[in-house]
Amino acid sequence: MPNSLPPPISDDIISTIGNTPIVRINSISTLVPSFDLTNVEILAKLEYLNPLSGSIKDRVAKRILEDAEKENKIKTGTTLLIPTSGNLGVSIAMLAHKKGYKTIVLVPERTTIDRIHVLKALGAEIIRTQNEVHHDAPESNFSLAKKLSSEITNSIVVDELNSQSNYNVHFEETAEEIYTQVEGKLDVLVVGVESGATITGLARNLKSRIPGLKVIAVEPQHSRIQDNMPINPSSIKERKVEDIGNNFTPPMLDRSLIDHWIKVDDQESFAMSRKLIKNGLLAGPSSGTVVSAALSYVKHRSTAHEDSIRILCVLNDTARNYGTTLLSDEWLLDNDLMDSEMVRKLEYQKIEKYRAASVEDLQLPAAVTISPNATISHAIELMLDREYSQLPVIDSHKKLIGYVSLTSLQTHLEVGGATLKEPISEWMFSFGGNKNGNSKRKRYQLITPDTPLSELAKFFEKHSFAVVTDSERKWCLGVATKYDLINFLNHRNSSAFS
């Protein structure tokens, strides 16, 4: 039986924004075994569970639009110009589409392509701007938004950096949630800083009610929110962590409420985020930054503090927004964002796990092939008899030209698109060449007996089977599946311990 009643049916998705859970990170000692976390309780507020963009910006978008509507600043047909690092643009674009507003989202070049795809699907027009230009520079997304607003009739700039609504939603709602959830018992609050409104709203509310509360402001290594010092453009270093950090001190930030500032480098941020994911928290890079800062605070606090301490980290957004960056081993490696532990594991996958073995070591049986002129009936009978789910198709010269799938043929028969007597050439998946009849063309990737098993494992991340051929693709030598790979490893490991 569940411990509590499920939430009632909501009238729309907007009403489900907020009321995000707080959880204990019980596995924190496994994340950083070198840290002494005795008497340390680390909590995480999962803002990445908000329903629109998967980020804390859903709260901001909802309040900004509600307040603008009440003040008659926007109406049906208004164009919303949104300078943003990404998430606020997604949140507002989703809400605007329902309300009949047009959206132009201005994002820096670093914004992940994952969120660009979402914005395009929502019908938003997207303008890319340079990454590290100052807020007031003519080429910044904020300056460009203001310029466009002066040229586009019935338009408004959604400026979260100067929005009282941004501050109010965190002072009035997010802080109240936190206070209720922790029952007024909290020692340290750790928050990533971008617009300054989140940390200012939370700190002003909670500090007035929780005596002795310490507030830690977090920014990426090359961010300049705290410093706010002019810098030679040639010495500016690009940040990889998105959605926190800035190159100036935003006007909404009240620095008098902050007890400590902590900067975290990009590599540490991404590595910690990947560790959080493995421990069940699907949080983005900025969340890794915040948790790393919390651990740094614990590490460097006075050893005289023997009392227990409760720390709350606000986890800003979801890892799902970073499929091509945070979740990509190749991207992390190319950008030198893997820590030594991640590099060791990657080397194990590529070298140690398969010990230089190749496809030839799988000892695959000879391939069972079929002609493109064979009937669908014969192909299905052959696959059922041999318990295969696909068959390579070879031409009269024994050259591989494609494959046929049992599931695909059965589906075509069920919906009436194909008959048992038709040749499979009309329904096969072809490699290259022109598309004939109903056949579908597939991109071919060469797999030979000499292909390392590490490369074959990578191939299986996107494909269910591999047709093994000679280097010139003249002969079909066998068919490999992930099952063959797993079976090979199990057999070798069993032999090593026998």
Image (tube, helix red, strand yellow):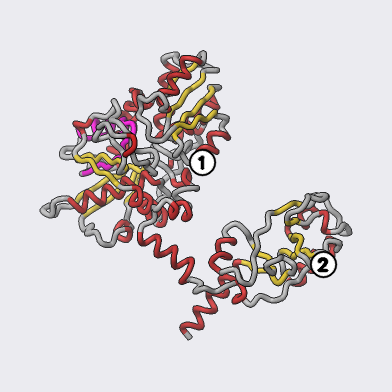
- Identify the element where label 2 is drawn: loop
Residue found at x 73% / y 57%: 431
Residue found at x 51% / y 20%: 79
Q: Which residue is mark 2?
A: 397
Closer to the camera in the image, 39 or 246: 246
What's the distance in space between the residues labelled 1 and 2, CA to CA? 44 Å
Closer to the camera in the image, 374 or 56: 374
Closer to the camera in the image, 243 or 473: 473
Mark 2: which amino acid?
His
Residue found at x 50% / y 39%: 115
Q: Which residues are magenta?
A: 188-208
Image spot of residue 180 (x, y percent): 29, 38
Q: For residue 278, which quarter of the picture?
A: bottom left
Mark 1: which amino acid?
Ile
Q: Is residue 46 visible?
A: no
Closer to the camera in the image, 161 or 58: 161
> Closer to the camera: disc 1 or disc 2?
2
Asked if the magenta segment contains residue 215, the reply would be no
Image spot of residue 398 (x, y percent): 80, 68
Q: Is 431 above or below relative to 318?
A: below
- Identify the element where label 1 is drawn: helix
| Earlier sequence position, callout 1 versus callout 2 | 1
Q: Is 476 above or below relative to 406?
A: below
Q: Is residue 365 visible?
A: yes
Image spot of residue 120 (x, y percent): 56, 34
Asked if the magenta segment contains residue 192, the reply would be yes
Q: Is 361 above or below relative to 87?
A: below
Q: Which residue is mark 1?
A: 113
Q: Residues within 10 Å of mark 2 (few under 14, many from 20)?
A: few
* Label 1 close to label 2 by CB (< 8 Å): no
